[in-house]
Image: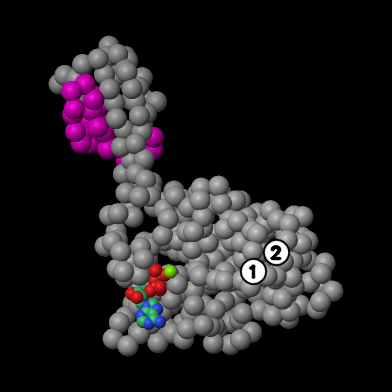
């Protein structure tokens, strides 16, 4: 039997009054996988995660965590959660805060005491657990937030916009923590409106717009296919165009540069050899990959508020 999916939602629907926040959202996260839920503000990412954590009840549809319906409190035992907006009592030290969260997660005090230094180390706060949160930078506070989500060794961590308040260095630190989680076999569902972030850490992406997943897949699947090659020659004449057309569709000719849409296998090496054999000087042959941004902009309707 295959391992239970860490997250499975089928046709999840959420209506707030007259406003439909989720329109049938279906999503899967496998154990140990880092999946990005990517979408503009208002797309429904936070609503989805709140349904998974039991904070919001779905209007219709199914949602399970490791096979357990989210309406069963037992579903929450194996997950950790970092909300989008959180405030910690800043008079506590980082270590004290983790101890409180350990109690909330039902850990025995002795087990929590042993685990806290490991977690501080994992989130890059070794040696800082005795300092008050008041003196932490935003990046440190955010990493402490991830730390509380990891304390009880969950198999799935839900992170809602974990880096949106951070500077580039803080973002990189959080990305490193997510990579460490993956290395430890922990599944992560990462909500983000930041393309670059999702591109850098996720195995798979589900692009959400207006309460639905409009596209999902591995990053290379989403941006692959329909790749173009820009070829710059010493001259572009009829014979060159004929030769190039044998390798794909000529999409554009700009002075000495020809843009070729090539399907399937990478034709660059053979193309280069054929051009040189035919007596052309090859100045450049550049594959142009579609970026995740191109895919995203082509799919979503912009910020819904
Ligand atoms: N408690 C609520 N009451 C009414 N509308 C809400 C509530 N929470 C979210 N919404 C609406 O649901 C939609 C999805 O919101 P949200 O899940 O927060 O999106 P995201 O996290 O992708 O920015 C938005 O249009 C938002 O205004
Ligand atoms: Mg949100």
Q: Which residue is mark 2?
A: 132
Circle 1 Cα neighbour tier, 10 Å, few/some/many (<14 / 14–19 / ≥20): some
The residue at the point 39 percent across, 35 percent down is 266
Is the distance from the Cβ of mark 1 to the nearest ligand 2 atom less than 8 Å? Answer: no
Q: Is residue 52 left or right of residue 14?
A: right
Of residues 267 and 165, the one drawn nearer to the viewer in this rendering: 165
Q: Are marks 2 and 1 in contact (CB under 8 Å)?
A: yes
Q: Which residue is mark 1?
A: 90
Q: Quarter holding the C terminus?
A: bottom left
Q: Which residues are magenta?
A: 243-266
Of residues 216 and 111, the one drawn nearer to the viewer in this rendering: 111
Of residues 117 and 258, the one drawn nearer to the viewer in this rendering: 117
Give above or below for 138 relative to 16. above
Does dot 1 land on a helix, a strand or a loop? loop
Q: Is residue 96 left or right of residue 183?
A: right
Does dot 2 land on a helix, a strand or a loop? loop
State the image coordinates of residue 150 (x, y, percent, origin top left): 67, 67
Determine the residue located farthest toward the top in the rendered image. 279
Question: Is residue 275 at all visible to an observer of this figure?
Answer: yes
State the image coordinates of residue 270 (x, y, percent, origin top left): 37, 25
Give above or below for 263 relative to 49. above
What is the distance, in whole Å, between disc 2 and disc 1 at their CAs? Answer: 7 Å
The residue at the point 19 percent across, 33 percent down is 252
Residue 126: image tag = none
């Amino acid at each position: 039997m295959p391992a239970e999916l860490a997250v499975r939602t089928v046709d999840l629907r959420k209506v707030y009054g007259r406003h439909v926040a989720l329109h049938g959202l279906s999503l899967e996260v496998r154990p140990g996988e880092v999946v990005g839920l990517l979408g503009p503000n208002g797309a429904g990412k936070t609503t989805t995660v709140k349904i998974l954590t039991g904070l919001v009840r779905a209007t219709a549809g199914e949602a399970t965590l490791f096979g357990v319906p989210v309406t069963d409190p037992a579903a929450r035992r194996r997950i950790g959660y970092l909300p989008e907006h959180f405030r910690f009592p800043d008079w506590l030290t980082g270590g004290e805060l983790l101890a409180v969260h350990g109690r909330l997660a039902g850990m025995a005090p002795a087990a929590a005491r042993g685990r806290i230094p490991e977690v501080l180390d994992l989130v890059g706060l070794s040696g800082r657990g005795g300092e008050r949160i008041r003196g932490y930078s935003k990046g440190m506070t955010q990493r402490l937030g991830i730390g509380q989500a990891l304390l009880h060794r969950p198999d799935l961590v839900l992170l809602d916009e974990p880096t949106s308040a951070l500077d580039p260095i803080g973002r990189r630190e959080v990305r490193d923590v997510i990579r460490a989680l993956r290395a430890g076999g922990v599944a992560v569902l990462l909500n983000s409106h930041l393309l670059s972030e999702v591109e850098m850490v996720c195995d798979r992406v589900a692009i959400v717009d207006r309460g639905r997943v409009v596209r999902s897949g591995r990053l290379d699947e989403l941006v692959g296919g329909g790749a173009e090659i820009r070829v710059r020659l010493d001259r572009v004449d009829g014979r060159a165009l004929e030769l190039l057309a044998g390798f794909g569709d000529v999409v554009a000719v700009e002075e000495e540069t020809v843009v070729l849409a090539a399907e399937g296998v990478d034709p660059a090496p053979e193309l280069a050899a054929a051009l040189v054999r035919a007596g052309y000087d090859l100045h450049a042959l550049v594959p142009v990959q579609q970026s995740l941004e191109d895919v995203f902009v082509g799919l979503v309707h912009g910020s819904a508020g």
